[in-house]
Amino acid sequence: MEHFYLTLLLGFVSFISFSLFALFYRHRAQFTGNNLPPGKVGYPVIGESYEFLASGWKGHPEKFIFDRMTKYSSDVFKTSIFGEKAAIFCGAACNKFLFSNENKLVTAWWPSSVNKVFPSSQETSAKEEAKKMRKMLPNFMKPEALQRYIGIMDTVAQRHFADGWENRKEVEVFPLAKNYTFWLAARLFVSLEDATEIARLGDPFALLASGIISMPLDFPGTPFYKAIKASNFIREELTKIIKQRKIDLAEGKASPTQDILSHMLLLCDEHGTHMKEHDIADKILGLLIGGHDTASATCTFIVKYLAELPHIYDEVYKEQMEILSCKAPGELLNWDDLQKMKYSWNVAQEVLRLAPPLQGAFREALADFVFNGFTIPKGWKLYWSANSTHKNADYFPEPFKFDPTRFEGNGPAPYTFVPFGGGPRMCPGKEYARLEILVFMHNLVKRFKWEKILPDEKIVVDPLPMPAKGLPVRLFPHKKTA
């Protein structure tokens, strides 16, 4: 009997060993072929996903990229992330190739987790919904259309600073920056002004943003699970707002041109069919995420760097005070004022270089092609990395030095500064982001100087860069506030 159990145990161990060997062999066999890029593919199923994400959790997302660029002496290397066969494209030439071949050799791709967090109400992919939005947005996001919103932005900013910053000795910047950009997006996209209603949606949006690009583990307690729950809650609330707007439009209480929501409700396709309420809710949800989350990270890091670099703060303050001195008491900012904020925008761009909200993005190969002598098979996922140029001394000398003068004159070389992506898929909200960031800077520096309470606070990237403790600062109000 003992021999029987021993034989059974050995058989079981042999079966498990063989199964694991077969699993590893099959996983690695997917990444073999003529002229594939160099690289390693990690473990079955998870690949190198943990290493990819963990480098951000540790505050250095560029480490995953630069370690492999150095190891393989290549600007293109293979890996396996999010359960996909992938190639990482690094550097300006790679950026140019991907951005120039959009919808020719490559197309946009997101991990399947994104479609679960943003379920398509029309049974199309998040990619298809994004295409529709990109066709719809230009009329609202081009500079001439945005000019009329600057006064509203300034009004929202003044209320934000009055409610959250003034008469306080210390504040936590990151949550406040998220409040500002969300309040602004809610006001401009759906004309939401009630502070209580905005606050009620704020926390779910934070959960949604933190779980979009996360390990797709759908059980209670995980960021992914919380993101799905938050997405469903926000969609329900937006549907209520949409229903009320339809009534207000019919009764003449709302304007057809007051915001993007009204435009979507009145928009017809070529067959004269209006968009359904749940389709509009999906699109507004995506806009609110894109319109507030990335800018809030940038505003936070502007506060961080201005605290650390007083000589940069002094130049920003000088520029903003010159603009303020030409305005009547109570007069709101306008388009001409923002065009004068050249140094302030150079500072913001240097922040975007060192702490890009968008670390990179995925594409999918539409066909087999050869790049840099390597074969990229159809269906492989391709990832371009902002940090591969932003923090690369070949493109930006002393890359970790904060230097706004990099953006004077003609600025950085093409395809090296890519915080908003590039090509046909460049972020359509780029100009909107510029305006909300500059309005934030103006209202901040005219009121305060500040210092960091935690000088060595850790930075985490998950998936956006953020201070681990929210960036607490001590405020020093100016004696006179305009």
Image (cartoon, rainbow, N blue to C red):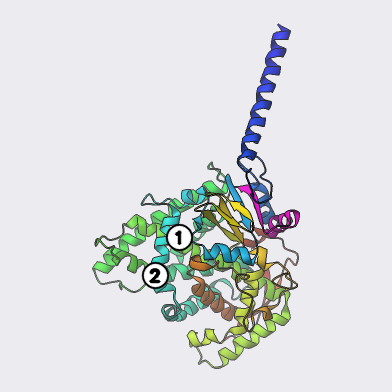
Residue 80 x %, y %:
62, 47
Q: Quadrant of residue 242?
A: bottom left
How many marks the image carries: the answer is 2
Residue 322 x %, y %:
60, 91
Residue in front for this viewpoint, 202 or 122:
122
Disc on res. 286: 1
The kind of residue on which mark 1 rests is Gly
Quadrant including the N terminus = top right
Residue in front for this viewpoint, 121 or 175:
121
Between discs 2 and 1, the one toward the N terminus: 2
Q: Residues within 10 Å of mark 2 (few under 14, many from 20)?
A: some
Instruction: Check disc 2 and report the residue beneath it.
Output: 191
Quadrant including the C terminus = bottom right
Region rendered in magenta: 60-81
Q: Is residue 109 above or below residue 420?
A: above
Q: In the rendered view, does 288 fall on the left or right side of 245?
A: right
Residue 306 x %, y %:
68, 76
Query: In the image, what residue occupies the spot 69% across and 73% down?
Result: 305
User: Label 2 to label 1, Cα distance in Å?
Assistant: 16 Å
Is 74 in the magenta? yes
The kind of residue on which mark 2 rests is Ser
Secondary element under disc 1, as helix, strand or loop, is: helix
Query: In the image, what residue occupies the spot 75% across and 67% down?
Result: 455
